Amino acid sequence: MQLPSRLRLSGTPFGEREFSRLWFFATVTYGVGDVMTTIALIGFSDRVREANPLIRAAVETLGNAGLVGLKLAVFLTFILVSVDAAQREGRIFYYLPPVVLTVLGTFTTVYNLRLLLG
């Protein structure tokens, strides 16, 4: 199955290797680190509750699947913004989504670990 041309990097000034690396770091920090530490906090801590009301509502309604689903929706939206920016040759919005998710994911993972261990 081939992706539609609007969802490919061919014909843009951006390479697939760079794209993969950027999104690898976003996946590790935001997609794995933040999700895993949030699940650990929600499941194992009696003194800490989720501060984000949207995530709290998703977890209360759908459990961990709500958390993962919401994170996936954000992640996929950011990827689409990045790919669309690549098609338009917009450097800022090509790089901004994975960088924002990497920084946010790193911060929340570290913060959650401090809450778990503290």
Image (cartoon, rainbow, N blue to C red):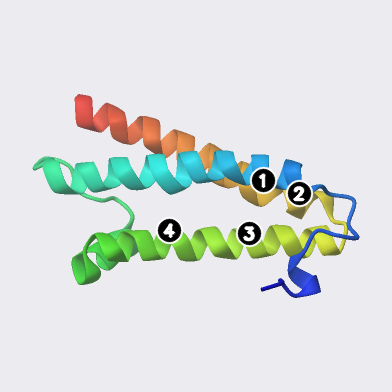
Which residue is painted at 23% across and 70% down in the image?
Answer: 62
**Mark 3 to mark 1: distance in Å?**
11 Å
- Which amino acid, mark 4? Lys
On screen, residue 24 above or below 116: below
Nearer-N-terminus badge (3/2): 2
Nearer-N-terminus badge (3/1): 1
Residue wearing tag 4: 71
Q: Residue 107, position in %: x, y? A: 45, 34
Query: Which corner quadrant of the image does residue 54 belong to?
Result: bottom left
Residue wearing tag 1: 20
Q: Residue 26, position in %: x, y? A: 55, 44
Q: How would you rate the neighbour count of disc 1 (Cα within 10 Å): few for under 14, some for 14-19, many for 20 or more?
A: few
Which residue is painted at 91% across and 60% down in the image?
Answer: 11
SS type, badge 2: helix
On screen, residue 74 above or below 16: below
**Mark 2 to mark 1: distance in Å?**
6 Å
Q: Residue 118, position in %: x, y? A: 20, 24
Residue wearing tag 3: 79
Residue wearing tag 2: 16
